[in-house]
Image: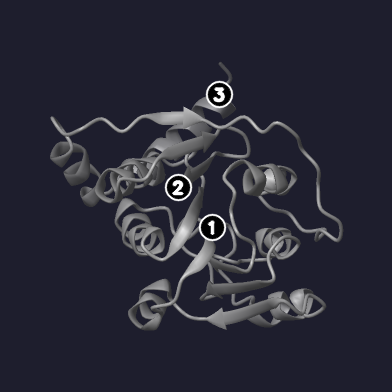
Amino acid sequence: MTLEVLRSAAHWFYASTYELEYWKAVLASLGTRKVPITGYVPRSRKSPPGMLNVDSAWKGIESILADLIDCFQIQTKRCLEFGVEFGYSTVALANFFDSVTGVDLFAGDKHTVNKNDIYDETATRLAPFKNIHLIRSDYREWIKHDNSSYDLIHVDIVHTYADTFACGLWSARHAQCVIFHDTDSFWAVKKAVVDIARETGKSVYNFRECNGLGILI
């Protein structure tokens, strides 16, 4: 194992688990019902047209969206995304859903490389996609007032257990399917997904590539 791999693993461990709420959740779940995680292996892959040419850890997931929608029989009218950043995943989802609402502060967080205000840049980049609607808001403010339902919600916010659980639990109660990015690079995210499944009775699937994509349905 190279030094670079060890450094990367150490970074992921620190970023994912140096959080009191994560360890509280680990202790609280001892002795509770085990939630199985089923591996998701797409039957086919095809990238949608018109994808953005920007760097993104989401690259690759766009090729499984059609298969995911078909496999889980997801309706394709309304999609909500928490965590837009540069808009790569937003555009990917817009290829399949009639309407995509993207909610983000557009200022980065402690787990992102970018810390600058990128709202104008992202809004300009996504302007040609008329079915995308960007909202500059913290997820906590959004879920206070939104009581509507969605076919799919994508959660890719700051990768703490507390935030992922709060946003994901609300999402699980307002959507047929919720997908979570970075389940394999942040232990806290995967733990939150499992705990939400336990509380809601939903099933968990996990796509191991592209830093992991948790699927709650």
Residue at (39%, 39%) from the top-left corner?
A: 187
The residue tagged 1 is: 112
Q: Amino acid at mark 2?
A: Ile
Name the element at disc 1.
loop
- Residue placed most toward the observer, 75 or 103: 75
| Occupied quadrant, residue 41 | top right
Of badges 3 and 1, the one in the foreground is: 1
Mark 3–mark 1 Cα distance, whole angstroms, equals 22 Å
- Residue placed most toward the observer, 159 or 200: 200
Mark 2–mark 3 Cα distance, whole angstroms, equals 39 Å
Please determine whether, in this image, residue 51 is positioned above or below residue 140: above
Q: Amino acid at mark 3?
A: Leu
Q: Amino acid at mark 1?
A: Thr
Residue 72 % position (x, y)? 57, 45
The residue tagged 2 is: 217
Of badges 2 and 3, the one in the foreground is: 2
- Decide: few, some or many residues near mark 3? Use Cα within 10 Å; few <14, some 14-19, many ≥20: few
Task: Using the image, tell me which numbered label, if any, was put on residue 3.
Answer: 3
Residue 170 % position (x, y)? 35, 64
- Decide: few, some or many residues near mark 1? Use Cα within 10 Å; few <14, some 14-19, many ≥20: few
Residue at (20%, 32%) from the top-left corner?
A: 33
Of labels 1 and 2, earlier in sequence is 1
Residue 6 % position (x, y)? 50, 26
